[in-house]
Image: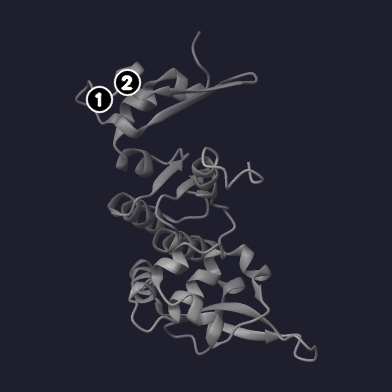
Amino acid sequence: MSLLKEEELVKPAHESLRKLHFSNQLGFAENVGTDLLVLNKQFLSQYNTLKKIQESDFKTSAKLFLVSQLEKSTIFNIIKERFVSIFPTVEDLKVEIKNKGIFSSFAQKSLDIKIKESGVDKWIELPRMSWGMVRTLKQLSELYLCAEGTVFLIDEFENSLGINCINEITNDILASRRQLQFILTSHHPYIIDAIGFDNWKLVTRNGGIIKTHNIDRFGIGKSKHSAFMQLLQLEEYQTGQEQL
């Protein structure tokens, strides 16, 4: 498909596949490998608008740095303020560039994501943050910095997230007015109950056969009990297997 991506019939399919975003559960783990050989005013001028940054192929951590350099954009501050509201002990957030290989002819530059916490003198670098903080910052950044039309595929959405993070991030996804699609798997009651049951799919596995089922097949929503409580009563949910 990549070889034929310029063909009129193939191009739309190729562009759609590029918008699939497999969100890893390791937060900003890719930050370690985000090295930029060239970083100067000319480079930054190529990504001088939010849209250009969103539509670039850079990792989320690099996009977060680029958006922090925009003079007339409030998106970085929005991400920072939202992060601070979820973690009130955090006072500030910044993304810096540090030089690597200073003795070589090409000075590589690596991204450094840090937070300032109240009562702590030194800035806290990414590897010393809690997984919940890292996952939350990654998800917030992706929500604002991905391209329009992105489809997120996230397995076990609640992994590493505390109850305060789960509630807030789920609400942010539901409140987003961008053209995004999220396909999430979860067993967490808040996440399941917060999302309208019309958007649910129940997944079953019988041996090597995996199926997804529309929730209306099970009569969910036709009772005075909450949709999640009705879901709990289903044998398919309890066992994970389709009842034949």
Residue found 40% across the figure and 45% down from its top = 181
Residue 95 visible: no
The amino acid on which the numbered mark 2 sits, given as a three-letter code, is Asp
| Residue contact between numbered discs 2 and 1, judged by CB atoms under 8 Å | yes
Which quadrant is home to the N terminus? top right
Instruction: Check disc 2: other Cα within 10 Å, few if <14, some if 14-19, many if 20+.
Output: few
Q: Of the numbered discs in the image, which one, if any, rests on residue 216?
A: 2
Lower sequence index among marks 2 and 1: 2
As drawn, the residue found furthest toward the front would be: 8
Query: Pointer 1: what residue?
Result: 221
Q: Nearer the viewer, residue 31 or 243?
A: 31
Q: Nearer the viewer, mark 2 or mark 1?
A: 2
Q: Tell me residue 20's x, y (percent).
A: 52, 47
Instruction: In this rendered view, identify the residue nearer to me: 15 or 11.
Output: 11
Q: Position of residue 183 (x, y in %)?
A: 45, 41
Q: Secondary structure at mark 2?
A: helix
